[in-house]
Image: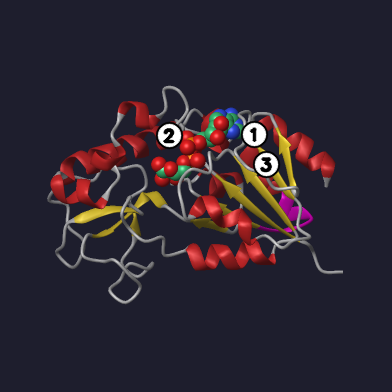
Amino acid sequence: MSKKRIAVLTGAGVSAESGLGTYRDNGGLWDNYDPMEVASIEGWYRNRSKVLDFYNMQREHLRNARPNDAHRAIAALEKDYIVDVITQNVDNLHERAGSTHVVHLHGEATKVRPENTFNDEDGYSEKAVFDVGYDAVHLGDKAPNGVQLRPHIVFFGEAVPKMEEAINLVSRADIVLIVGTSLSVYPAAGLYRYARQEAPIYIIDPAEVPLFDSRIVHIRKVATEGMKDFAGML
Ligand code: APR
């Protein structure tokens, strides 16, 4: 019998217990930084150094962060299921916990690319993207094509190139699991709506969830605890 498929949609909450900040919780990143200045395409053209410094800080935090039991529990699902992790997170903790198929809808903090690449044709895809690990990138750091390096992040105001792939994965899933996202940034926030009618949807989040769909089971706990409950429901 072929393995069932689980689509796991994660947000910043799954990495909260690894010490990485969320965005919209009290004290979250957007309480201290204006996303339009540090995470938007207009912000990039207005002040590249400010954006580079924001992601240098994120990379430095990531250097010292470790996957938590929720990342590990998600990776462990691969023993019995085909698991597609579709994350809004730009950290690499799912991969470091052992997940083997991770789709980063909003890009990856450890990766950079020339600033003149925006789509598959001109090199946006993995051809022009490379991994700097946790090192800083500064104004004047150029790609092999001589163009200024930019974070391989989907800035506010930019398209989400992996959305079609994500929709395909969710629409094929037998089970949908959502962990640690406020579901406030589209199009990612609307992904769960592509789940098949017969696919149960589990949400792990300690906060109230603004969804009204009979298929949803809300496990109102933090990710590391909620993943234990979820495993028991499979
Ligand atoms: N375990 C599980 N969930 C948690 C935990 C935890 N320990 N701590 C917080 N949460 C939940 C919060 O209740 C909230 O619902 O995680 C969610 C975090 O929401 P946001 O901070 O909005 O993060 P996210 O949903 O990932 O943001 C989406 O917005 O700014 C953009 O690109 C950015 O990818 C990000 C996107």
What residue does disc 1 label?
A: 223
Instruction: Give the Cα separation between the discs numbered 2 and 1.
Output: 16 Å
Q: N-terminal of the two: label 2 or label 3?
A: 2
Instruction: Give the Cα separation between the discs numbered 2 and 3.
Output: 18 Å
What residue does disc 2 label?
A: 23
Identity of the residue drawn at 68% across and 48% down: 177
Question: Does mark 2's beta carbon lie closer than 8 Å to ligand 1?
Answer: yes
Q: Nearer the viewer, residue 219 or 68?
A: 219
Q: Nearer the viewer, residue 28 or 71?
A: 28
* Residue 195 vertical placement versus 214 (above, below): below
Identity of the residue drawn at 57% across and 64% down: 167
What residue does disc 3 label?
A: 203
Residue 91 shows up from this direction: no
Please provide the residue range marked out in magenta: 77-83
Q: Nearer the viewer, residue 193 or 32?
A: 193
Horizontal arrangement in the rendering, residue 43 relative to residue 160 (left or right): left
Identified by mark 1, the residue type is Ala
Q: Position of residue 130 (x, y in %)?
A: 34, 59
Instruction: Give the Cα separation between the discs numbered 1 and 3.
Output: 10 Å
Q: N-terminal of the two: label 1 or label 3?
A: 3
